[in-house]
Image (spheres, helix red, strand yellow):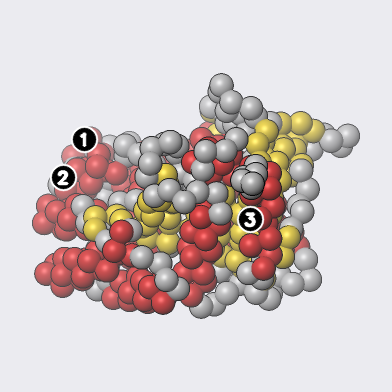
Amino acid sequence: MTATPPDARDLDQSLAALLAGAGFARSEPPLLIAADLVRDLVGEALARRLYLTGDGDGAELCLRPDYTIPVVQMHLEGARAREAAAYSYLGPVFRQRPGLPGEFRQAGIELLGRADREAADAEVVSLALKGARLYTSGPLTLAMGDVGIFLGLIDALGLSPAWRRRLAKDFRRSGGLAQDLRRLAEPPATGPSRAGLLAALEGSDPKAARELVTDLLSIAGITTVGGRSASDIAERFLEQAALGSGGLSPDKVAVVEKVLAVEADPMSAERDLRAIAAAAGLDLSGPLDRLARRNALLAEAGVDLTNARFSTSFGRDVDYYTGLVFEIGDASGKVDKQLVGGGRYDRLTDMMTAKLGLDIKVPAVGCAFWVERLALAGGRS
């Protein structure tokens, strides 16, 4: 007699059991969370897809668009905020998705407070692959990157803080980086083109300049433009003033382009990046040593890195990733979107601790399982 194959919900529960068995305690955060908190953390693309509502006091709320923010918030507001903790989840999340249901199920893990970052990274990637294998025996792809390498590169180049922020933001969105690299290679603007308020702000004390621009907007009766506050507009003025000063030599821009062009298995990528950095006289030992340690730990965990692809230009579409980023895909072509995705998001916890007034650092790495896509990849629905 042939055994009945498990259906998708049975596999979801098998995944939940796997995560719990690996030491990730089940978390059940609220369905409703503060909309402003989500907007501040996830970026415009996801913020536009929120389902919004309000409470009796007029506070704007949204249905959780994923689990990461409410799980991290629960941890930071709890008694264990200063301790390492591992959480798992499985349940509904809500996003506006044209042509698709706005409610769907998601599973995942969040590993918080672990100081051994590379070991935590390797644990999450290894568990993500094991979870995906519950659903399908077919071929899987593993794409990896490391935002920290690019951040280390722009620090090593000695760029101004404004340019470092601009390029870091460019890296996390499509279309802007190549244009800004060309702009960096141009000589600094001089003469009449720098006249006016931007030229007056260039090089001035940031606090005084911000207050000046805010006051000028207030005098003109401008409080918001396109949803941006006067303070936001002032920050934009200051950024434009700073971006007008100084540039980067074409040879250094070429180094950035070489770094971003690296794509190979993770071990070969590390060697290629060290060679580029040495030839350019740039110290990237910190992020590359971390990459090497993560590679070694992944290999020890049984992850076949020879078939993984590491790309220096690979990022994810939210601003809070700071190190490892990865996606697991379906190599058979049944599902063309990621099956599992995640990475290191220390910047998210930094922003949240600042909002909560906590003077702590909470390293964080995790991933989300798109269980509906995993079921499709395994031929189940």
Few, some or many C-alpha atoms within 10 Å of disc 2 (few <14, some 14-19, many ≥20)?
some
* Residue that label 1 marks: 192
Q: State which mark lies toward you, 3 or 2.
A: 3
* Residue that label 3 marks: 15
Instruction: Look at the numbered disc 3 and give the secondary structure of its residue.
Output: helix
Look at 21% across and 70% down and name the residue there.
Answer: 271
Q: Label 2 vs label 1: CA separation?
A: 17 Å
- Marks 3/2 in contact by CB < 8 Å: the verdict is no
**Does the rendering let one see residue 143?**
yes
**Does the rendering let one see residue 215?**
no
Task: Give coordinates of residue 89: x percent, y percent.
Answer: 69, 54
Task: Give coordinates of residue 76: x percent, y percent.
Answer: 71, 64
Residue 325 vs residue 381, the one in the foreground: 381
Instruction: Look at the numbered disc 2 and give the secondary structure of its residue.
Output: loop
Question: What is the residue that sits farthest to the front in this orientation?
Answer: 1
Q: Label 3 vs label 1: CA separation?
A: 63 Å
Few, some or many C-alpha atoms within 10 Å of disc 3 (few <14, some 14-19, many ≥20)?
many
Look at 68% across and 33% down and name the residue there.
Answer: 103
* Residue that label 2 marks: 186
Few, some or many C-alpha atoms within 10 Å of disc 1 (few <14, some 14-19, many ≥20)?
few
Residue 142 lies in quadrant: bottom left
Question: What is the residue that sits farthest to the right in this orientation?
Answer: 56
Residue 90 vs residue 189, the one in the foreground: 90
Task: Give coordinates of residue 277: x percent, y percent.
Answer: 19, 68
- Left-right relation of 85 to 29: left
Q: Amino acid at mark 3?
A: Leu
Q: Label 3 vs label 2: CA separation?
A: 52 Å
Residue 48 lies in quadrant: top right
